[in-house]
Image: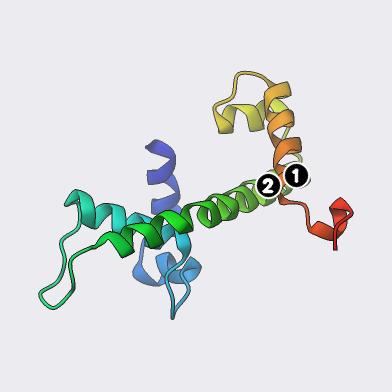
Amino acid sequence: MAALFRIAERHAGTDALRGRQVHPALIGPHEAVRLVAFLLSGAALTEEDEPEVDRADITAALSLVPRARGEMDELEAGLLRMARGRGMTWPEIAFGLGLGTPQAARQRYERLMSRTAEPSAQGGE
């Protein structure tokens, strides 16, 4: 939680700063999944004229999970590339990821690179 508070304090202290990463016209897959989960759990309440979450909403949210996971993989892969580009060591990266060894961090990076590589880079179309 300390990491979340650090970033929030330093880079998301106002609505304008928080809104930099949000698409202005459409919520992202992870936001849609989270919204449905929050509404279902009662962590968020529906507005007066808002329909209740139904089975189709749940199905739609579930169908977005792979896309949200893929976006997170791409974000993590990019962050790892930028960390290495800024001179961070594998031990530093392992610590940041909560991994026990630099080797585990490097292996995670390699797995992410293979999962997020463009089809042309993998010999596809």
Q: Tell me residue 96's x, y (percent).
A: 57, 33
Q: Is residue 52 left or right of residue 36?
A: left
Q: Tell me residue 4's x, y (percent).
A: 41, 44
- Mark 2 sits on what residue? 77
Q: Tell me residue 89's x, y (percent).
A: 73, 31
Q: Quadrant of the C terminus?
A: bottom right
Few, some or many residues within 10 Å of mark 1 (<14, 14–19, 20+): some
> Residue 113: which disc?
1
Query: Which amino acid type is marked by label 2?
Result: Ala
State yes or no: discs 2 and 1 in contact (Cβ < 8 Å).
Answer: yes
Residue found at x 20% / y 49%: 41
Q: Looking at the image, is mark 2 or mark 1 nearer the viewer? A: 1
Q: Give the SS element for disc 2.
A: helix
Residue reaching furthest to the top? 100
* Residue 40, above or below 15: above
Residue found at x 48% / y 70%: 20
* Residue 21, above or below 86: below
Residue found at x 35% / y 55%: 34
Q: Is residue 14 left or right of residue 43?
A: right
